[in-house]
Image (spheres, rainbow, N blue to C red):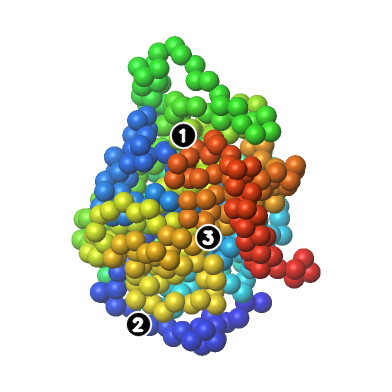
């Protein structure tokens, strides 16, 4: 049983604080399956994301931002806890039904904000437990809307549900008042606008976890027609060639999927609605806004390409190549953070301590064990210690993308990947070769050895014994 919250705060040296209007609000947009190259501000010439691009221009755009894992549930656990996913026993996306869930004893980032007097809210995809006592309201969120018990909706169109013999996991609750033709991303945003209006007089922490742009790939018909015309204008009758990849898989070679582009434009419009509401309520200046993704774009399948292209990065969701783990991350705080482009490496676990420090709270190093605060880098510029630190990944599973178990490490500009299936290792110089096309393992055996030893040590250190 989870320790009573008040007792847990005492044990950790925390004390609930009265709400102060001068404390910055926090708004986190977590997008599902959004690729590193899927935004105009990230270089896309096909997708249209003007509102998100405007957000990017107002704050820090982190070019070397990474998800904790190439699939969703582990990264979501890392964001909530500040720990590498394996520390909390979540190394794969969680199917339904499942006994896997975010452990009760973890002090989540939401609970720390709750203790500091913030009103905490959660909208959308959770995917860290399916039972009533495993949902966001059991992990520090006062308010919760549109959270289903699965990893995706049955449909993006009302009534957003389906029944199966396994159970009713795909229903999206709190949206019962809709009507035929209503679109899920629009309906969820309506709830977000309600939350902002109701909590404008007190500090808030709102975590808006979109289901978009995860499958099923569905979008409003008028937007799909718009992008079908754009595909024709840009590419004529030509067909995109697939990019052959490891283990017989294929990546998409260009961004040209009309329905996916339409989903993304609708998402952008809804982000714009939220940003406009902040402006209307005069909350923009003192609100920290984070926009990020849970893994790389879905570009890669065994027999056909996925729905987006992550070029110039290699591969996509489900793989430890850059396209599977490098993600777009934007952090804006108009009152304190100047607009800039940062090369400082960041990983999902860093968000927890970063938000604590930016909002004037004490860091909790025994909780966010694997996260580092980026506050100084965001406020004053690059930090050499952050630039040169090692980032590591372990994904010991097969995946529908064709992936077989692999592990990876990035240190400075070096990136090494170890594949279990054939015990091979690949080494890349990301500064010269961000697309990971020139394997230097044979030319640099000592570097491979050093990185492999460090990666093994990290996996051993962060993976609890099987009996635990």
Q: Look at discs 2 and 1 and give the one toward the viewer.
A: 1
**Which residue has dot 3 on it?**
390
Sequence-wise, the earlier of marks 3 and 2 is 2
Q: Is residue 183 left or right of residue 251?
A: left
The secondary element bearing badge 1 is classed as loop
Residue positioned most to the right: 467
**Which residue has dot 1 on it?**
311
**Which residue has dot 2 on it?**
18
Q: Position of residue 46 (x, y in %)?
A: 37, 29
Sequence-wise, the earlier of marks 2 and 1 is 2
Query: Foreground: 88 or 186?
Result: 88
Q: Do the residues labelled 2 and 1 touch (CB within 8 Å)?
A: no
Residue at 63 percent of width and 37 percent of height: 401
Residue at 56 percent of width and 30 percent of height: 251
The secondary element bearing badge 2 is classed as loop
The dot on residue 246 is none
Q: Position of residue 332 (x, y in %)?
A: 30, 57
Query: Foreground: 193 or 284?
Result: 284
Image quarter where the C terminus lies is: bottom right
Query: Foreground: 213 or 403?
Result: 403
Q: In this view, does 303 lie to the left or right of 184?
A: right
Q: Where is residue 115 in the image (x, y as percent from the top left)?
A: 44, 78
Q: Dot 3, crowdedness within 10 Å: few (<14), some or many (≥20)?
A: some
Task: In the rendered view, tell whether residue 318 sits above or below residue 15.
Answer: above
The answer to whether any part of residue 156 appears in the image is: no
The secondary element bearing badge 3 is classed as strand
Q: Do the residues labelled 3 and 1 touch (CB within 8 Å)?
A: no
């Amino acid at each position: 049983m989870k320790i009573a919250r008040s007792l847990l705060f005492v044990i950790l040296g925390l004390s609930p604080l009265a709400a102060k209007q001068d404390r910055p609000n926090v708004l986190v947009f977590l997008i599902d399956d959004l690729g590193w190259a899927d935004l105009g501000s990230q270089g896309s010439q096909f997708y249209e994301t003007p509102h998100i691009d405007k957000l990017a221009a107002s704050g820090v755009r982190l070019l070397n931002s990474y998800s904790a894992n190439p699939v969703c549930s582990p990264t979501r656990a890392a964001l909530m806890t500040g720990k590498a996913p394996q520390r909390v026993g979540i190394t794969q996306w969680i199917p339904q039904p499942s006994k896997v869930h975010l452990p009760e004893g973890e002090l989540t980032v939401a609970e720390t904000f709750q203790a500091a007097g913030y009103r905490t809210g959660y909208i959308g995809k959770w995917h860290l437990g399916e039972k009533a006592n495993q949902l966001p309201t059991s992990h520090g969120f006062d308010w919760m809307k549109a959270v289903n018990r699965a990893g995706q909706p049955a449909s993006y169109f009302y009534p957003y549900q389906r029944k199966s013999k396994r159970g009713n996991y795909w229903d999206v609750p709190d949206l019962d008042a809709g009507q035929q033709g209503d679109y899920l991303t629009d309906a969820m945003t309506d709830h977000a606008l309600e939350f902002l209006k109701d909590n404008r007089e007190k500090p808030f922490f709102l975590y808006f976890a979109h289901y978009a742009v995860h499958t099923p790939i569905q979008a409003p018909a008028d937007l799909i027609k718009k992008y079908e015309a754009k595909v024709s204008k840009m590419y004529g009758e030509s067909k995109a060639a697939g990019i052959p990849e490891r283990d017989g898989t294929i990546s998409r070679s260009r961004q040209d999927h009309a329905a996916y582009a339409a989903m993304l434009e609708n998402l952008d419009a809804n982000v714009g609605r939220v940003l406009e509401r902040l402006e209307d309520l005069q909350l923009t200046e003192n609100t920290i806004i984070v926009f990020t993704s849970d893994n790389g774009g879905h570009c890669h399948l065994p027999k056909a390409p996925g729905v987006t292209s992550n070029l110039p990065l290699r591969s996509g969701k489900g793989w430890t190549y850059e396209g599977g783990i490098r993600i777009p991350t934007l952090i804006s705080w108009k009152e304190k953070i100047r607009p800039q482009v940062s090369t400082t490496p960041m990983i999902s676990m860093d968000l927890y301590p970063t938000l604590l420090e930016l909002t004037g709270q004490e860091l909790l190093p025994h909780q966010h064990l694997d996260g580092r605060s980026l506050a100084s880098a965001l406020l004053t510029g690059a930090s050499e210690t952050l630039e040169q630190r090692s980032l590591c990944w372990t994904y010991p599973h097969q995946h529908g993308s064709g992936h077989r178990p692999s592990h990876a490490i990035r240190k400075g500009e070096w990136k090494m990947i170890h594949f279990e299936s054939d015990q091979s290792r690949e080494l890349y110089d990301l500064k010269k070769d961000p697309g990971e096309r020139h394997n230097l393992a044979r030319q640099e055996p000592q570097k491979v050895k050093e990185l492999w030893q460090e990666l093994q040590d990290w996996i051993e250190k962060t993976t609890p014994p099987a009996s635990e």
